[in-house]
Image (tube, rainbow, N blue to C red):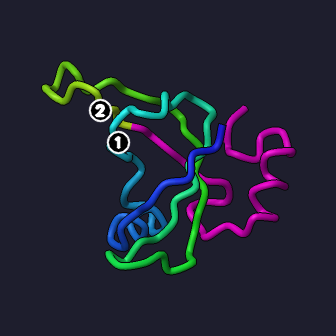
Amino acid sequence: MNHVLKSCRSAFEAFLDRSKPVEIRRNDRDYRVDDTLTLCEWNGFWFTGRTTTVLVLSVFDLTCAGLAGFVAIKTTTPDGYRENTPEDIEKARRKPGAWGLS
């Protein structure tokens, strides 16, 4: 399943430069391994039009950390954290091993 999510500019940039491989989110969408997250850059007033899609590698419930209802989502992208076009994403989804997983 693909989840389209708002991502503030600093978090969005961190995904692109590989410094943020984990996303903390309220678990209101039942995130699961192998889902994709389409992150849409939000500057606080409007969407900028920049998007990237990441693959969910693992989901950790944060209840034991005192954050009931939240999860930590570990992610990756095809071709190492570059901005993806819709065509890139569709091509990667159809190609076995394209997400760097066997």
> From what the image shows, is residue 59 above or below residue 16?
above
- 10 Å crowding of disc 2: few (<14), some (14-19), many (20+): some
**Which quarter of the rendered picture does the C terminus lie within?**
top right
> From what the image shows, is residue 53 above or below residue 60?
below
At 22% from the left edge and 25% from the top edge, which residue is drawn? Answer: 68
**Which quarter of the rendered picture does the N terminus lie within?**
top right
Secondary structure category for the residue under label 1: strand
> Circle 1 is placed at which residue position?
25
> Circle 2 is placed at which residue position?
70
Residue 40 in the image: state x and y as whole percent.
51, 65
Identify which amino acid the numbered label 1 is placed on: Arg
Give the left or right position of residue 33, taking residue 45 as reference: right
Give the left or right position of residue 62, taking residue 54 as reference: left
At 29% from the left edge and 32% from the top edge, which residue is drawn? Answer: 70
Secondary structure category for the residue under label 2: strand
Q: Is residue 74 magenta?
A: yes
Q: Which mark is residue 72?
A: none
Residue 52 in the image: state x and y as whole percent.
58, 63
Of residues 77 and 101, the one drawn nearer to the viewer in this rendering? 77
- 10 Å crowding of disc 1: few (<14), some (14-19), many (20+): some
Q: What are the residue bounds of the magenta stretch?
A: 73-102
